[in-house]
Amino acid sequence: MRCFGDGDPLYEQYHDTEWGVPEHGEHALFERFCLEAFQSGLAWITILRKREAFRAAFADFDPEVVAGYDAHDVARLMGDAGIVRNRAKIDATLANARAVLELHDAGRSLSELVWSHAPADPVRDPRAVTFSDVPASTPASRALAAELKSVGFRFVGPTTAYAAMQACGLVDDHLAGCPVVTRRTPHS
């Protein structure tokens, strides 16, 4: 059995091909952090099912475009039933896009900032058997959330930061019995 997603083809594909795979691309990282913020308080499958609508609504998560959104865009987004219509989360996405551009102006990248918080060993030893063995946050996710907030990110606390770290492969929290893990483990 997978860690999660069994029985839903979209969820299974996400689990098998994306979750936990190292991601360094600026747009992809921006998207993941934005979607994790929108997920706050909701089931991830809800966000996953709306992902294409989010991509359309937020210009494929191009921070340069999203940073230029204005009050008319916010009104358009609040009327878009294809996404989660939460004003605070929409405003945070715009602020986060501006923060990415400010990082770039300072000669930094979102990838550099995020990956500077990756643990030396991304796999917990021993590997967790159930998700109750996986923390909701870690010292690294608390540090990442604090640094993101210090550069202007919003809606990214330690738990959201840790979920993004999992999704983007900074940590590998696939459970011990997960097929993703067993396919990688050499058999004697």
Image (cartoon, helix red, strand yellow):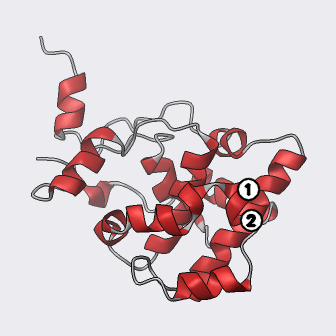
Under circle 2, the secondary element is loop
What is the number of the mark on residue 76?
none
Outermost residue toward the top? 188
Query: Compared to 89, does 28 lie above or below?
Result: above
Residue, disc 2: 67
Is residue 83 visible from the viewing direction of this image?
Answer: yes
Quadrant location of residue 68? bottom right
Percent x, y of residue 110: 70, 46
Real-space CA distance between mark 1 and mark 2, rounded to the nearest whole angstrom = 5 Å
Quadrant location of residue 7? bottom left
Residue, disc 1: 64
Residue type, numbered disc 1: Glu
Under circle 1, the secondary element is helix
Q: Pointer 1: residues within 10 angstroms few (<14), some, or many (20+)?
A: some
Query: Compared to 52, does 167 lie above or below?
Result: above
Left or right relative to 17: residue 94: right
Identity of the residue drawn at 54% across and 56% down: 60
Left or right relative to 108: residue 179: left
Q: Locate the C terminus and report the quarter of the image it occupies.
A: top left
Query: How many tags in the picture?
Result: 2
Residue type, numbered disc 2: Ala
Contact between marks 1 and 2 (CB within 8 A): the answer is yes
Percent x, y of residue 44: 34, 67
Quadrant location of residue 141? bottom right
Percent x, y of residue 117: 64, 43
The residue closer to the viewer here, 48 or 124, is: 48
Left or right relative to 73: residue 55: left
